[in-house]
Image (cartoon, grey):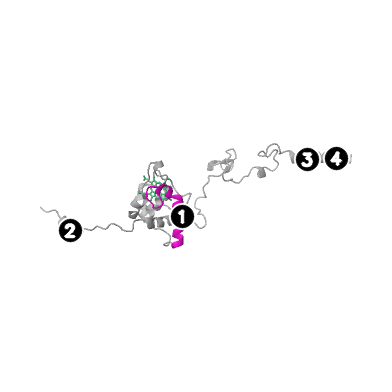
Amino acid sequence: MKKIAIIATLILSMAVVFMGCKDKRNPGTVYMPDMAYSRAYESYAARDSSLFTTDPANAGHKIFYNNLSPAGTIKRGELFPFSVPNDSNGLINLSALVKNPLEPLNGKELEEAGRLFNINCAICHGAKGENNGPLAAKIGGVKSIIATSPGYSDGRIFFVTEYGQLNMGSYASQLSREQRWRIVQYIRTLEPKTVPVATTAVKMDSAVVKK
Ligand code: HEC
């Protein structure tokens, strides 16, 4: 009788052990669901809509996750958010009021900014910040950064990296704010050194219309 009990227990435990072995991806009979199906959001995993929701109204019934950090929070070490609105007044007027929050970069930091520029921007704008990167022709042409940047405030250049501009996308998710303010400083080093100066001074009296 004792033997039968031992054999039965053995068979039963073997069955439990092998129960989930049919398919590697299938956890089989699940007795600890939170171990099999993570309640945490798994990056790069397909999101199961029967478990997750992006609608705050549904939170509680399903796991709420919308990929955004909670409102009002800032990543540790990150600069304050760029609060200029994404409209033409923001681009042309308000962005100019935002000063570059960083001190002038030293040689090493500038080198790092250049590295980021070459990775993220040069594919379209070219290493010199113009309009001749390898992708430029494929997306129907890009604008030269340094053709206009000398006349733009730091904030306006940052604005373009924050929101993108027509065929150029936003870089807000690829580069931190600090990295983008650094790139703005790097762009300044690419700008032509000789700023065209008006050579003929306008004589005030010659500008007066003579009757
Ligand atoms: C996919 C190609 C592409 C990449 C990569 C790209 N840009 Fe652009 N960029 C463009 C295009 C296209 C325009 C012109 C948009 C338009 O027609 O107004 C532009 C315009 C700009 C302008 C505005 C020029 C002006 O005269 O208004 C700035 C500044 C700029 N880019 C900076 C950057 C920076 C900095 C990066 C890297 C973080 C970058 N771009 C990466 C395609 C790109």
Q: Is residue 107 magenta?
A: yes
Query: What is the spatial separation of the Cα atoms under label 3 and label 2, in whole angstroms?
Result: 101 Å
Residue furthest to the left in view is 211
Which circle's residue, 3 or 4, is located before the other in the chain?
A: 4
Which of the 4 quarters of the picture holds residue 20? top right
Query: Residue 74: horizontal and vertical position, in percent?
Result: 50, 54
Disc number placed over residue 51 in the picture, else none:
none
Q: What main secondary structure does the magenta stretch of the protein show?
A: helix
Judge left or right: residue 177 versus residue 195. Answer: right
**Amino acid on which the number 1 mark rests in the picture:** Arg
Residue located beneath label 3 in the image: 14
In the rendered image of this protein, does residue 105 appear above or below residue 169? below
**What's the magenta region?**
106-133
Residue 30 falls left or right of residue 125: right
Whether label 3 touches label 2, CB < 8 Å: no
Mark 3 and mark 4: Cα distance apart in space: 14 Å
Identify the element where label 4 is drawn.
helix
What residue is shown with label 4? 5
What's under tag 3, amino acid-wise? Met
Relative to 108, 58 lies left or right:
right
Whichever of labels 3 and 1 marks the residue nearer the N terminus, that label is 3
Instruction: Tell me the residue that label 1 is attached to.
Output: 115
Q: Label 3 crowding class (10 Å Cα cut-off): few <14, some 14-19, many 20+? A: few
Considering the numbered disc 1 on the image, is that residue within a helix, a strand or a loop?
helix
Residue under numbered circle 2: 204
Measure the C-alpha gap from mark 2 to mark 4: 113 Å
Amino acid under disc 4? Ala
Ranked by sequence position, the earlier of labels 1 and 2 is 1
* Residue at 83 percent of width and 38 percent of height: 8
Disc number lying in front (3 or 4) = 3
